Amino acid sequence: MNFKKYFHITLICLTASVLMALPVAAKRGTEPLPERALISPAQVTQAIQVENLLNSRENVALPEGESWFKVVKGTIPVIITAPHATRPFREGKRRFSDGGGTAALALALGEQTGASVIYTTYEGPSDPNYYDDNGFKAALADLIQAETPVLLLDIHGSHPFRSYDIDFGTMNGESLLGQPGLLHRLIHRLKEDGIDSLSSNRFAASSHQTITKFAAQAGVPAIQLEINATYVMPSEGNLEAQRFSVLLQALSRFVTDVADGQGN
């Protein structure tokens, strides 16, 4: 093959490559811009204060006249629970807590969206995610009856060595009550914010008397979120604080979607 012929073939190939790339470039140019960021440093600072306060109550006796959980009523039909923000009492002994950061996330999510929140404030006499006969579950039942929620999210912390960012516990789909779009919408919102190492039903929330099961039996679609601890310990450092902020943003957008009827 002579040089001139080789040059012509190369030029044709190069031209074809450029023409094929033009539609891709055009498509990229029309992609929607990202949404405006929601979460401020002040919100994370406040969450750190909540986290530290609840963590400081390990081995602290419940003060006389105090409740071991708190209900914060919201303005939209969504409930967020954090039943293991302090150490639960199960089968005759104290178990580890998921950390005060789980309640900090629940409260921040409630403040951002208007969702109702129930979380533990001290080490109580029971485990709300294992037993039904306790004050926490009674308060949850009252809230469900009063508000007729369209969704419950149950927040837990998972070991930092877990390979996932979040594991969704849906009783293998049963707790969605025929609304798989809720989970699909949640996944979409998480991935939009770069949270994409996801798992399904590693902890299915189907054993014992879980909050997810309790809500589903009451007619409320529910999802248990087993969140890698690196997302719910913002006091540990800048990276953890930023991960907390990103997760709060993604969950806030999801909860707002659901409240606006976009989760089905």
Image: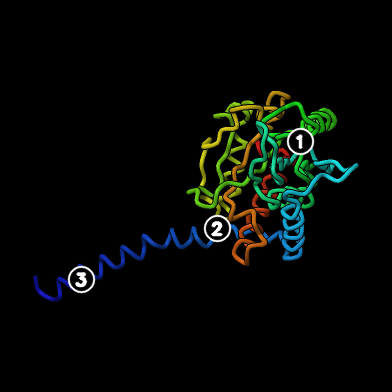
Of the residues shown, which amino acid type is indicated by label 1? Pro
Quickly name the residue at label 1. 125
In the displayed structure, 259 sits above or below 163; it is above
Quickly name the residue at label 3. 8
Q: Position of residue 163 (x, y in %)?
A: 48, 49
* 8 relative position to 40: left or right: left
Mark 3 or mark 2, earlier in chain:
3
SS category of the residue bearing label 3:
helix
SS category of the residue bearing label 1:
loop
131 or 157, which lies in front? 131
**Residue 74 appears in view:** no
* 160 relative position to 100: left or right: left
**Residue 36 appears in view:** yes
Task: Please tell me in which quadrant of the rendered image residue 33 appears.
Answer: bottom right
In the displayed structure, 104 sits above or below 118; it is below
As drawn, the residue found furthest toward the right would be: 65
Of the residues shown, which amino acid type is indicated by label 3? His
